[in-house]
Amino acid sequence: FFGRLFGHDGGERRRRIALCELMLSPASVQNIKNQLESRNYEVVVFMATGVGDTAMEELIEEGLFDAVLDLSPGGILDGVVGGTRKACSQRLETAGRMGLPQIVVPGGLDFITPSRAQYKPEYEGRKSYEPDKLRRQIRSSKMELVSAGRIIAEKLNKAKGPVKIVIPTKGWSRIDGPGRPLYDPEAGDALVQTLKDMCKTEIEIIEMESWIEDKGFQLYLINSIQQMLNLK
C-alpha cells in the first residue's frame, strides 16, 4: 500500500523528505517542493492540523522517510492552550528517535487556535486574524511561547540525528512580520531565547533576517537539508 501511495514499485527509490507546513502560501510550498524534486528528492507534504502531522509521525516511524523539513510545529503550542491543532504526543520526536536529519522552523507558533470552549477573556485584547467566519487565529503570548519552547527543546534534545532550528526573524507565517496582522517581535524573542537556553549544544540555532515566505530563506532550508542528507 505504502509503495503505491508514494510511487515506489520496489526498485531503488529516491531519498524521501517529509515536508510539514501550515499558514505558508501555496506558492512557497510548491517552490520548496519543486526545488527539492529538481535535486532528485521525493517530497511528501503534510498539513500541520493535528491530523496531518500525526500521520507524518506515523509514516516516519514506518521508515518511509530519510529527512524531515518541519516548517510548522505550531501544534505543540496548541497543546499548551487546548487548541484545535493540538499535536500528538510523539510530535517532534519520531525523526530524532530514528536518527533522521531534521530542520525545524517556528512556523505557526505565532498564533493559537483555541476552541470556543477554551476561549479566555484576555484573548479579546490580543491581535488576531480571521481567515473566514469560522476560524480565528490569535497572537501567541510570551508566556505561551516560553512554555512551547521548553517542550520543543525537550523533544529535540532527545534526537539521535542532526537537528537544525532555523528562525526567520521577520515573520513565522504569512500573517506574521512587520506590517502584518500578528506581528509581535517581543513574543517571538521569548521563544528564541528559551530555545537557546534549553537546547543541547549539538543543535544548531540559526537566525536569519528573513520572512518565512522569502525565497532566499527557503533556498537556505533546501540547501541545508541537502547538506545534512549528504553527511548522513
Image: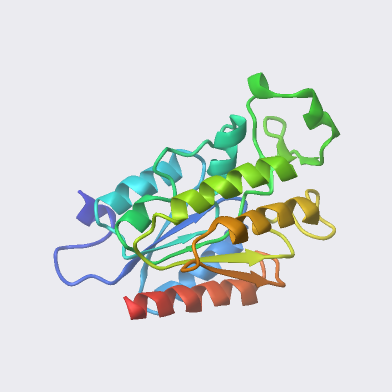
Q: Is residue 231 left or right of residue 69?
A: left
Q: Position of residue 47 (x, y in %)?
A: 49, 48
State which quadrant residue 45 falls in. bottom left
Front position in the image: 11 or 80: 80
Which residue sits at x=69%, y=49%? Answer: 110
What percent of the width, then of the height, locates residue 104?
Answer: 51, 60
Instruction: Say if 182 sits above or below 98 in the image.
Output: above
Along the line of sight, the residue nearer the viewer: 5 or 17: 17
Horizontal arrangement in the rendering, residue 38 relative to residue 85 (left or right): left
Q: Residue visible at 52% across and 53% down? A: 153
User: 9 left or right of 92?
Assistant: left
Q: Quadrant of residue 197?
A: bottom right
Residue at position x 67%, y 66% in the image: 168
x and y percent of residue 138 in the render? 73, 38
Location of the C terminus (image quadrant): bottom left
Residue 175 visible in the picture: no
